[in-house]
Amino acid sequence: MGKLLLVALVVLVVFWILKAYRKHVERPSSTHPPPAVEDMVRCAHCGIHVPRSESLSSGERHYCSEEHRRLHGG
């Protein structure tokens, strides 16, 4: 009887380990795509670098805020 319980316990432990391993293997990789690389531009007033899409441009110059564009005379 003791041997039967030991075998049942070993089978349950192996089953539990395989289930955990399978869950780990089948887990999908990150669902979020990697962030796109974006050019950085320098504010003509203060020199801070901001992403091009977040900058305000005036001609060839880029600014980090409307206030800096106004102060710089752009």
Image (cartoon, rainbow, N blue to C red):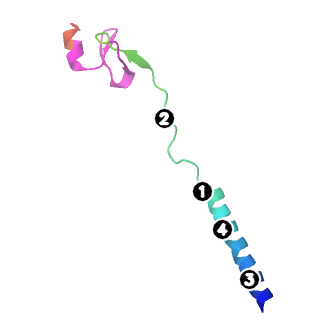
Q: Is residue 9 above or below residue 44?
A: below
Alpha carbon distance from label 4 to label 2: 33 Å
Q: Which residue is mark 4?
A: 19
Residue at mark 2: 35
Q: Is residue 65 magenta?
A: yes
Q: Secondary structure at mark 3?
A: helix
Please indicate whether residue 34 sits to the left or right of residue 61 in the image.
right
Q: Work out how far the residue at label 2 is from the one at label 1, CA to CA, in angstroms.
A: 21 Å
Q: Secondary structure at mark 1?
A: loop
Residue 21: give x, y in percent of width and height: 67, 62
Marks 3 and 1, Cα distance to the nearest angstrom?
29 Å
Look at the numbered disc 4 and give the secondary structure of its residue.
Answer: helix
Q: Is residue 12 above or below residue 63?
A: below
Is 7 displayed left or right of 68 in the figure? right
Q: In this figure, which residue is indicated by the disc labeled 1?
A: 27
Disc tally is 4
Which residue is depicted at the point 72% across and 80% down?
9
Could you tell me which quadrant the C terminus lies in? top left
- Please tell me which residue is depicted at 66% across the width and 57% down the height of the picture: 25
Identify the mark nearer the N-term, 4 or 2: 4
- Label 2 neighbourhood size at 10 Å, few (<14), some (14-19), many (20+)? few
Residue 35 lies, in percent from the top left, at 48, 35
Mark 2 vs mark 3, CA separation in Å: 49 Å
